[in-house]
Image (cartoon, rainbow, N blue to C red):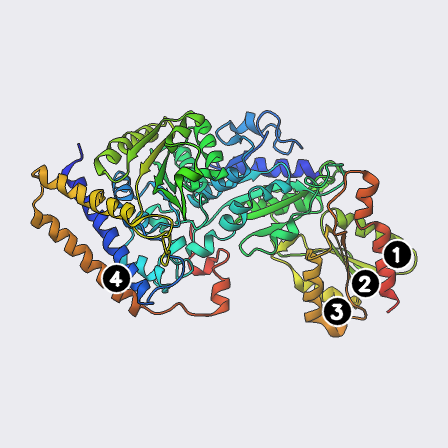
C-alpha cells in the first residue's frame, strides 16, 4: 500500500502495464511531452518512446479506429481522449465499429482496447466538456463501462481493463484526479474484477447507489442522515457494464428503500435502468418507489451557480432519503 | 511485367468474383438471399490484382461492396455464401451477412457497412504491422463516396505522420449511391488529395490489371520497406445498381453499355493474356468453367447448410469474449 491520488494511481498502473506488455501503444492528444492535459501520462514519452506513446493530431475518429484495428491484430492499445465528450465526435468508430466488431465478425480472438478519458462537471468547462457519457455507452451492447470513484478502485479496475479481452470504456472524473491521497494497493497484479459493486458504508434504512463523484456526495449525505438516526447503505457499482445488480438487490432487500444519485442527466440516465431492474427483481421488498437524482434535462451551464443548479446536491440526496423514510 | 503464375491467379480471382456475384444476383432475384447486397461486378480487376500482391499475413479492410475483396483475400465461396444467406457455417456465424463479412484468419479485417468506417481500422492493422516490424502491410479499400468522409482524411494524415505501411485504394466507381462523383467531389482525380497528406498519389484505370499491378506493386514494396503510405485511385464502374433493387434512374443505358461492352476488365485482361501467347482460349475457358461450377456448388451447399441455433443465451455469449468457447489470443 502507498498513498496516491487518483491521477497517480492511474499513471502508475498504466506505466506498470506498459512495462509488462512491451507492444502496448497509447494514442492521444498531447500525450507526448505534456503527458496529457491532466498529466495522467506524464513522463511516458520519455520512458516508452514516441513509437509507443503516440502524440496524435486532433482526430478522435482515427484514434479509435486505428486503436481498434491494431487491437484486432493483437497489439494492446490504449486511446486517451482529452474529454469523454469528444468520443461523440468519433461515435461511429466507438459505437458502430468498436462495440460491434466481436459480434458481427463472429471472432473469438481478444480485442485488447482501452478507451479512457475524464468527464463530468466542476471546472467550468461548459456544455460540451462536462457531460457524463458513460450512461449513453451503457446502452450499446459490446462495450464494458468502468467508472471508479477512488484511487484504489482506479488502479485495480484499470489494470483489469488493460488485461481484458474486450474493448473497455474507462471513465475518470476530472474533480477526483487531484483529490486527497489514499492507500492504493501496489501489487503489480492487483486487479478488481468487473461487475463487483463495493459497499462503502453499511446501513439498514435506505440504499443509495452512486458512482464517481456522487459516491463522495452520497457518503456526505449519509453522515448528515446518521445524525438524524437514519442508517444509509452506500453502494458503488464501479462498473456499469457488467452491472452488479445482485449486490444492489440484496441491499434493497435489507433496507427496503432505494435512491440513485448520478451526474448524468436524469432522463434515461443509468439510474433509470437500476430503478427498473430493482423494481422487477425486488418489488415486494420495496417500502417506497425508488427515487432517481440526476442532472436536469438541460445542457451543463458554464456559470458555477447555474452549473450547481443543474446538478443534484448533497442536500437533495438527504431530502430524497428523508422522503423515502416517510413510507 | 506480371509473372505468368500471378496472371493466372488474377484471372481466376476475377472470374471467381464474377461467378460468385452473378450467382448472388440470381439468388437475390429468386428470394434465396435477402438484405442489403452490393455487387462488385465490373470492378473485379482492383481486388484481384491488389490481393494477388499480398500474403495471408497482410491485412485488408473492405467496404459494403466487399464480396470481391473477401474472395480475393482467400475466402472460400462456400463459407462466403453461407454468410451471405446467414447460415451457421458462414465466416461470421450468420451475424453479419453481406455487409460485414470478415475472415481474420486471412487478414481480412472486415467489410464495413459504414462508408469510410473501415479506413482507420486498416490503418490500425498497419500500426500493428509497423510495431511487429516483419514487413507486413495493410490495404484500405474504399470508394469515391468514402473519400468525402472526415475519418478518411484523419486517417490519411495520421498514416502519413506515422509512416504507416498502408495503401489507400480508392475504388472510384463514379457514383455514391445515386450521386455522380462530379457533383459530390471537389476534384476530378481524387488522388490529388494525397498531396495534402504528403503521400504519393496515383490515378489508374481501375479496369486495367496491368496499370493497377504496376502502381500497386511499387506502393506495397514502399510500404514493406517502411517508407509510408500511398494513395491509389482506381477509376472503375459498377455494372449493377448501388444495391440489389436499385432502379438506376440516375444514369443512362448507353453509359452502362459503354462500360460493359468496351471496358469490361475481364475481357480486356483476357485479350492481353491471349495476345501475349502465354495462355490459350481453352486454358482460360477451363478456369471460367471451374469458377462457375464452384459458385453453383457454393449456392447449393449454402442453401443446404443449417440455420444458426436461435438461442438468446448463445447470442449473448458472442457479444463479449468467452474463454470456454475456445477464445484465443
Frontmost of labels 4 and 2 is 4
Question: Where in the figure is residue A98, as x and y percent of width and height?
Answer: 50, 48
Could you confirm whether marks 2 and 3 are on the same chain? yes
Could you confirm whether marks 4 and 3 are on the same chain? no
Q: Is residue B272 visible?
A: yes
User: Is disc 2 in contact with disc 1, using a CB cutoff of under 8 Å?
Assistant: yes
User: Where on the picture, by quarter, is residue A182?
Assistant: top right
Q: Residues within 10 Å of mark 3 (few under 14, many from 20)?
A: many
Which badge, 2 or 3, is on the more N-terminal residue? 2
Residue assigned mark 1: A225
Rendered view: B189 above or below A70: above
Q: Could you say which disc has been placed on residue B80 in the image?
A: none
User: Is disc 4 in contact with disc 2, using a CB cutoff of under 8 Å?
Assistant: no
How far apart, in angstroms, are the residues tagged by discs 4 and 3? 57 Å
* Residue at the outermost bottom position: A284
Describe the element under mark 3 as helix, strand or loop. Answer: helix
Chain of the residue under label 1: A
How far apart, in angstroms, are the residues tagged by discs 2 and 3? 10 Å
Amino acid at each position: 500500500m502507498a498513498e496516491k491520488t487518483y491521477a497517480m494511481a492511474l499513471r502508475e498502473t498504466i506505466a506498470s502495464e506498459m512495462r509488462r506488455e512491451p507492444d502496448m501503444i497509447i494514442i492521444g492528444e498531447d500525450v507526448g511531452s505534456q503527458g496529457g492535459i491532466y498529466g495522467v501520462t506524464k513522463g511516458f514519452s520519455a520512458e516508452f518512446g514516441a513509437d509507443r506513446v503516440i502524440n496524435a493530431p486532433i482526430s478522435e475518429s482515427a484514434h479509435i479506429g486505428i486503436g481498434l484495428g491494431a487491437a484486432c491484430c493483437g497489439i494492446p492499445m490504449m486511446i486517451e481522449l482529452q474529454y469523454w465528450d469528444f468520443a461523440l465526435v468519433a461515435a461511429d468508430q466507438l459505437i458502430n465499429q468498436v462495440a460491434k466488431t466481436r459480434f458481427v465478425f463472429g471472432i473469438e480472438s481478444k480485442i485488447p482496447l482501452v478507451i479512457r478519458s475524464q468527464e463530468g462537471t466542476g471546472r467550468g468547462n461548459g456544455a460540451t466538456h462536462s457531460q457524463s457519457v458513460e450512461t449513453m455507452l451503457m446502452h450499446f451492447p459490446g462495450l464494458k463501462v468502468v467508472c471508479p470513484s477512488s484511487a484504489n478502485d482506479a488502479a485495480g479496475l484499470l489494470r483489469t481493463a488493460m488485461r481484458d479481452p474486450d474493448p473497455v470504456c474507462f471513465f475518470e472524473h476530472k474533480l477526483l484526479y487531484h483529490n486527497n491521497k489514499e492507500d492504493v494497493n501496489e501489487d503489480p497484479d492487483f486487479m478488481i474484477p468487473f461487475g463487483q459493486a463495493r459497499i462503502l458504508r453499511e446501513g439498514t434504512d435506505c440504499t443509495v447507489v452512486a458512482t464517481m463523484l456522487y459516491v463522495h456526495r452520497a457518503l456526505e449525505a449519509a453522515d448528515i442522515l446518521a445524525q438524524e438516526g437514519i442508517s444509509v447503505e452506500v453502494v458503488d457499482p464501479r462498473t456499469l457494464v457488467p452491472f452488479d445488480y445482485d449486490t444492489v438487490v440484496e441491499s434493497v432487500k435489507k433496507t427496503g428503500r432505494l435512491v440513485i444519485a448520478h451526474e448524468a442527466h436524469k432522463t434515461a440516465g443509468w439510474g433509470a435502468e437500476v430503478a427498473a431492474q430493482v423494481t422487477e427483481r425486488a418489488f415486494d421488498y420495496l417500502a417506497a418507489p425508488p427515487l432517481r437524482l440526476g442532472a436536469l434535462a438541460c445542457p451543463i451551464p458554464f456559470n458555477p451557480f447555474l452549473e450547481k443548479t443543474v446538478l443534484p446536491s448533497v442536500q437533495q440526496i438527504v431530502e430524497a432519503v428523508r422522503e423515502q423514510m416517510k413510507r | 511485367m506480371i509473372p505468368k503464375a500471378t496472371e493466372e491467379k488474377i484471372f481466376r480471382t476475377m472470374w471467381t468474383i464474377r461467378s460468385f456475384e452473378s450467382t448472388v444476383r440470381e439468388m437475390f432475384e429468386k428470394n434465396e438471399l435477402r438484405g442489403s447486397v452490393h455487387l462488385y461486378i465490373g470492378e473485379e480487376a482492383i481486388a484481384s490484382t491488389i490481393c494477388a500482391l499480398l500474403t495471408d499475413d497482410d491485412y485488408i479492410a473492405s467496404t459494403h461492396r466487399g464480396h470481391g475483396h473477401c474472395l480475393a483475400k482467400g475466402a472460400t465461396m462456400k463459407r462466403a455464401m453461407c454468410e451471405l444467406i446467414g447460415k451457421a457455417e458462414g465466416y461470421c456465424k450468420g451475424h453479419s451477412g453481406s455487409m460485414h463479412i470478415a475472415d481474420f484468419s486471412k487478414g481480412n479485417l472486415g467489410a464495413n457497412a459504414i462508408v469510410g468506417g473501415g479506413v482507420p481500422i486498416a490503418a490500425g492493422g498497419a500500426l500493428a504491422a509497423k510495431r511487429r516490424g516483419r514487413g507486413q502491410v495493410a490495404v484500405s479499400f474504399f470508394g469515391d463516396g468514402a473519400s468525402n468522409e472526415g475519418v478518411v482524411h484523419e486517417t490519411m494524415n495520421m498514416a502519413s505522420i506515422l509512416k504507416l505501411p498502408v495503401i489507400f485504394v480508392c475504388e472510384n466507381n463514379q457514383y455514391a449511391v445515386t450521386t455522380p462523383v462530379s457533383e459530390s467531389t471537389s476534384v476530378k482525380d481524387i488522388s490529388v488529395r494525397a498531396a495534402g497528406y504528403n503521400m504519393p498519389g496515383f490515378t489508374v484505370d481501375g479496369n486495367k490489371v496491368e496499370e493497377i499491378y504496376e502502381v500497386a506493386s511499387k506502393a506495397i514494396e514502399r510500404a514493406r520497406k517502411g517508407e509510408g503510405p500511398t494513395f491509389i485511385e482506381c477509376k472503375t464502374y459498377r455494372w449493377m445498381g448501388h444495391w440489389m433493387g436499385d432502379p438506376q434512374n440516375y444514369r443512362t443505358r448507353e453509359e452502362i453499355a459503354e462500360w460493359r461492352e468496351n471496358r469490361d476488365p475481364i475481357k480486356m485482361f483476357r485479350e492481353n493474356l491471349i495476345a501475349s501467347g502465354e495462355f490459350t482460349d481453352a486454358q482460360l475457358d477451363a478456369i471460367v468453367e471451374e469458377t462457375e461450377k464452384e459458385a453453383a456448388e457454393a449456392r447449393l451447399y449454402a442453401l443446404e447448410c443449417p440455420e444458426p441455433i436461435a438461442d438468446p443465451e448463445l447470442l449473448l455469449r458472442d457479444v463479449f469474449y468467452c474463454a470456454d468457447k475456445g477464445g484465443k489470443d
